[in-house]
Image: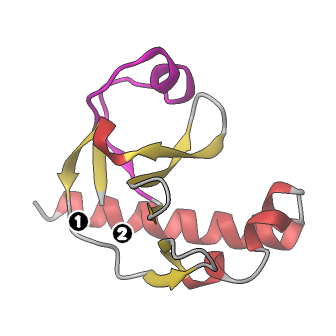
Amino acid sequence: MTVRLINKSKQNTLWLKDDGKAHVVLGITFSMSLGRSEYLLWSEAQLSIGLYQSKDFKDECSELSRHWQVSHDDIGNCQIYPLAWSEDSFWDKYNDGDHNAENIFKFWKKELELESQKKESEK
């Protein structure tokens, strides 16, 4: 799945390098408590990941990744990520710099990017 930034607010352009190219969606979160959906995207500008409101983007390719799995948290939010990213405390470990978590993240990020490139080349 790829998206293109349409809301070029200062916050979005500060965090995302907006050079007009599509961004690979690494995951989707549906927050029932906040009433919104967010895309997990890689920021080239920050060299990190971030959650961005989906309403700020236009879908370029809306085909969902074959690597995604659905999971739910304790407060009813729904995440669609690679299964390894949905395991207990994965994101805590990743944010704390755990090398194993970083390697798992890099592996699945690359898989999602390759899948997106393949879909793009098949158009």
Q: Residue at x 74, y 65 (%)?
A: 91
Q: Does the magenta stretch include residue 71?
A: no
Q: Which residue is drawn at 89% across and 65% down?
A: 98
Q: Where is residue 94 in the image (x, y as percent from the top left)?
A: 79, 62
Seen in the picture, residue 53 relative to 71 is either above or below; the reply is: above
| Label 2 SS | helix
Q: Position of residue 101 (x, y in %)?
A: 79, 70
Q: In this view, does 111 lie to the left or right of 97?
A: left
Q: In the figure, residue 83 lies in which quadrant?
A: bottom right
Quadrant of the image containing the C terminus: bottom left
Q: Is residue 39 left or right of residue 121?
A: right
Magenta segment, which residues? 5-25
- How packed mark 2 is, by other alpha carbons closer than 10 Å (few <14, some 14-19, many 20 or more), is some
Real-space Cα separation, disc 2 to disc 1, in angstroms: 6 Å
Q: Where is residue 81 in the image (x, y as percent from the top left)?
A: 50, 73
Q: Of 56 and 99, which appears nearest the observer?
A: 56
Q: Mark 2 points at which residue?
A: 115
Quadrant of the image containing the N terminus: bottom left
User: Amino acid type of disc 1?
Assistant: Lys
| Label 1 SS | helix
Q: Which mark is residue 43?
A: none
> Dots 2 and 1: beta carbons under 8 Å?
yes
Q: Does the magenta stretch include residue 9?
A: yes
User: Amino acid type of disc 2?
Assistant: Glu
Q: Of 102 and 78, which appears nearest the observer?
A: 78
Q: Residue at x 75, y 82 (%)?
A: 88
Q: Mark 1 points at which residue?
A: 119
Outermost residue to the left: 123
Report the colour scheme.
secondary structure
Number of numbered discs visible in the structure rendering? 2
Seen in the picture, residue 117 relative to 89 is either above or below; the reply is: above
Q: Position of residue 24 (x, y in %)?
A: 39, 52
